[in-house]
Amino acid sequence: MMAFDTIVKGGMIVTAADRYIADIGIKDGRITALAAELSGADELIDASGLLVLPGGIDSHVHLSQPSSDASVMADDFESGTRSAAAGGTTTVLAFALQKKGQSLREAVAEYHAQADGKCHVDVSFHLIISDPTPQVLGQELPALIEAGYSSFKVFMTYDDLVLNDRQLLEVFAVAGAHGATVMVHAEGYDAIRFLSEKLEREGHVAPYYHALSRPEIVEREATHRAISHAEITGIPIVIVHVSGREALEQIRWARARGLKVSAETCPQYITLTADDLRDLNMGFEGAKYVCSPPPRDAESQAAIWQGLVDGTLELFSSDHCPFFFQDEDGRGKDTPKARTSFRWVPNGIPGVETRLAILFSEGVSKGRISLEKFVALTATNHARTYGLYPRKGTIAVGSDADLVLWDPNRKETIRQETLHHGSDYTPWEGFEVTGWPIATMLRGSVVMENGQVLNRPGNGHYLTRYTSSAQATANVDWSKALSADTNQSSITG
């Protein structure tokens, strides 16, 4: 019997801590050896001249998620995870959204049914709490946290999702009592409504005015309020999709007070600006860039880069929220209703496949961040934050053999025609990058090679995660966790 199923030979291994040239021995989907020279495998993969990185973890991905209007997600779990694999991401954390009036358990069951047998990469769910009833807070949420749904998201805006301050405090208190991680979409609901209605009365209804209806002060105020609620309840929080300087200032202020506040940003905030929402031809193309918070300006981009460099921003996610631009059934961004006001344009853009290439090109290739920082921002910190480390997010003996073979010198131009997502456009059409994934390996198997996704839907596993408190007190038996989930054949409840 061979010592290994596969050996990845001669690549430059990069983790969040160091880099070195070595062989990687893989057995039963896990890394079992790292050495200068290994032999004895059924399969040899030559990685000489390439970087070998941990598989990307994208902890902010929306798939098969319903909207309050007629629009629908352009990606289900099959197309979304196929796109992730093509871009070098081996784990996605998607959302199970509770609709108003719905049992939280019912919401989770619905999303498992949609994901079961369809995923190309590994998946786990954050919960979205939209209706924190006494039953949800007292029974369902604690039980689900205990069952491994160890993180959830709350919204401070959107008609069908917004929680008021009392509800936020109650939800935060449950998280504190059970060791869950809370993600916060921090934009002020009433301020956005006030500004949107004012702009509409003045006749400013084009997609560009979406950005003006959600200025940085709206994000700053909500960020400060979320931090204050976290301080009152004594919990750590994650502020997601931070877009500029003003929210960053609030996060730094909180950390200076000793509060545990993590922060995430996304590709749109280092490459796009509000001007992309303008359409100089008086058309509707700017709707392609409508997301929340909106892209800002060059000064905000510089602030985001500083936050990535100095560690204020620890997570780099896609916030993949894909819609069609045009759809024959009127379910995309370009609809008669959306043309009456920016307020009706579905908020969200696709990006799970292009996330790694954009950050590598703009960050590593241009000398802004190191290779180690790139790995931390795109894999390791996600695993640490959301209860997956060291199973995921690193290259170490005992970890899942989730790897990306990366050519740091390969130049590509992002084109919709070569992407694998379900949307009919990419906001980065024509964007040139340096650095590209050559192959993606999920638990030791090559699932993407040279742009071709090779595995079948259903090869992805559902990942049970642990609470931050369990990890902190070393109560996690990772060998059992690795064995238990690796034996699953597909997404299950």
Image: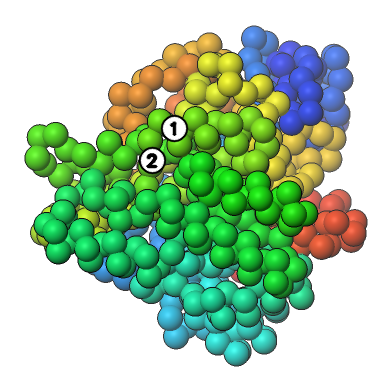
Q: At 40% across and 68% down in the image, what residue appears?
A: 189
Q: How many marks?
A: 2
Name the residue tied to disc 2: 296
What amino acid is at disc 1? Glu
What amino acid is at disc 2? Arg
The image's mark for residue 126 is: none
- The vertical placement of 192 against 272, above or below, is below
Name the residue tied to disc 1: 299
Q: CA distance from mark 2 to mark 1?
A: 8 Å
Q: Badge 2 local density, few (<14 within 10 Å), some, or many (20+)?
A: many
Circles 2, 1 touching at the beta carbon (< 8 Å): yes
Element type at marker 1? helix
Q: At 63% across and 66% down in the image, what residue appears?
A: 228
Q: Residue 110's x, y, as percent?
A: 48, 72
Between 111 and 338, which is closer to the camera in this rendering?
338
Q: Residue 323's x, y, as percent?
A: 31, 52
Q: Quadrant of residue 101?
A: bottom left
Q: Residue 359's x, y, as percent?
A: 52, 29
- The vertical placement of 342 against 404, above or below, is below
In the rendered image, the residue lying farthest to the bottom is 134
Between 453 and 168, which is closer to the camera in this rendering?
168
Give the colour scheme of this rendering.
Answer: rainbow
Between 401 and 91, which is closer to the camera in this rendering?
91
Q: At 67% across and 33% down in the image, what residue appears?
A: 310
Q: Residue 264's x, y, as percent?
A: 57, 46
Query: Dividing the image into 4 quarters, which one contains the C terminus?
Result: bottom right
